[in-house]
Amino acid sequence: MRTLEEPQGRVLPANELADALREAIVRGELVPKQRLVEADLADEYGSSRGNVRAALSELIVEGLVEKIQNRGARVRAVSVEEAVEITEVRGALEALCARKAAERISDPDADELRGIALRMEDAVARGDRETYSECNQRLHAKIIEVSAQHTAAATIERLRGQAVRFQFRLARQPGRPAVSLPQHLAIIDAVCRQDPDAAAEAMRLHLESVADAIRATSM
């Protein structure tokens, strides 16, 4: 037990604790339906009970954690069917963002997207799934940023969090990057060409493919 004379270590802030717990859930270190005990989390992560409560509240809003009456919090279990539905809704919203991005794209933004495309191609050639996954996230984030669709962006972020475990596993499946690479390149090409219809369709088809891949995990 720490005494009053002992130096106090840095207490992990609620936002950093939420990030750490989110990452643990995504990577499967915290599993669906696992109880999240405030005292245990405070000890493990070097935070306060108040910060733990605030972090869990944030993850509850995101749909990663759920509150069970008289039993505290636990990691929320998302079924394959729900993950597919979430991805399909994301598809509609991100298609809108791709359309708007194609209408608003600037030369510097287009150069960044083309740079992402080159990195993705290189990552697939080298079999570097980690880099490919990072580029994938950056690509989607960049298109949403360029679109300036703030309401859609907030909704997509909440939806993405709920199904992110499935997408994390998909991104690391052998051969999956080679399947999604042409889809990502088509999105980038259409946005950079300022073709709204093609950009929306390319994004829709990409997330339809993601939904199909998630659906296949239950077979």
Image (cartoon, rainbow, N blue to C red):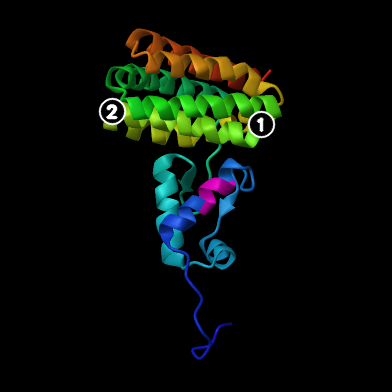
Q: Is residue 19 magenta?
A: no
Dot 2: within a 10 Å radius of its alpha carbon, few (fewer than 14), some, or many (20 or more) residues? some
Give residue 10's mark: none
Which of the pair 177/10 is nearer the observer? 177
Q: Residue at x 56, y 37 (%)?
A: 77
Dot 1: within a 10 Å radius of its alpha carbon, few (fewer than 14), some, or many (20 or more) residues? some
Quadrant hosting residue 131: top right
Q: Which residue is drawn at 57% across and 27% down?
A: 120
Provide the secondary structure element on which disc 2 rests. loop
Residues in magenta, as a range? 20-24
Kindly tell me whether residue 182 is visible in this rendering.
yes
Q: Pick whichever of labels 1 and 2 is earlier in the sequence.
A: 2
Q: Mark 1 points at which residue?
A: 172
Q: Name the residue under label 2.
A: 149
Quadrant hosting residue 190: top left
Quadrant (top left/top right/bottom left/bottom right) for the C terminus? top right
* Residue type at the position of mark 1: Arg
Q: Where is residue 57 in the image (x, y as percent from the top left)?
A: 40, 51
Q: Where is residue 212 in the image (x, y as percent from the top left)?
A: 58, 15
Q: Is residue 115 above or below residue 28?
A: above
Magenta span dominant secondary structure: helix
Q: Residue at x 32, y 28 (%)?
A: 146
* Residue type at the position of mark 2: Gln
Which of the pair 99/168 is nearer the observer? 99
| Identity of the residue furthest to the bottom in this view | 5
Provide the secondary structure element on which disc 1 rests. loop
Kindly tell me whether residue 74 is visible in this rendering.
no
Q: Where is residue 49 in the image (x, y as percent from the top left)?
A: 46, 66
Q: In this view, does 146 lie above or below 54?
A: above
Quadrant (top left/top right/bottom left/bottom right) for the N terminus? bottom right
Q: Which residue is drawn at 35% across and 8% down?
A: 197
Quadrant hosting residue 95: top left
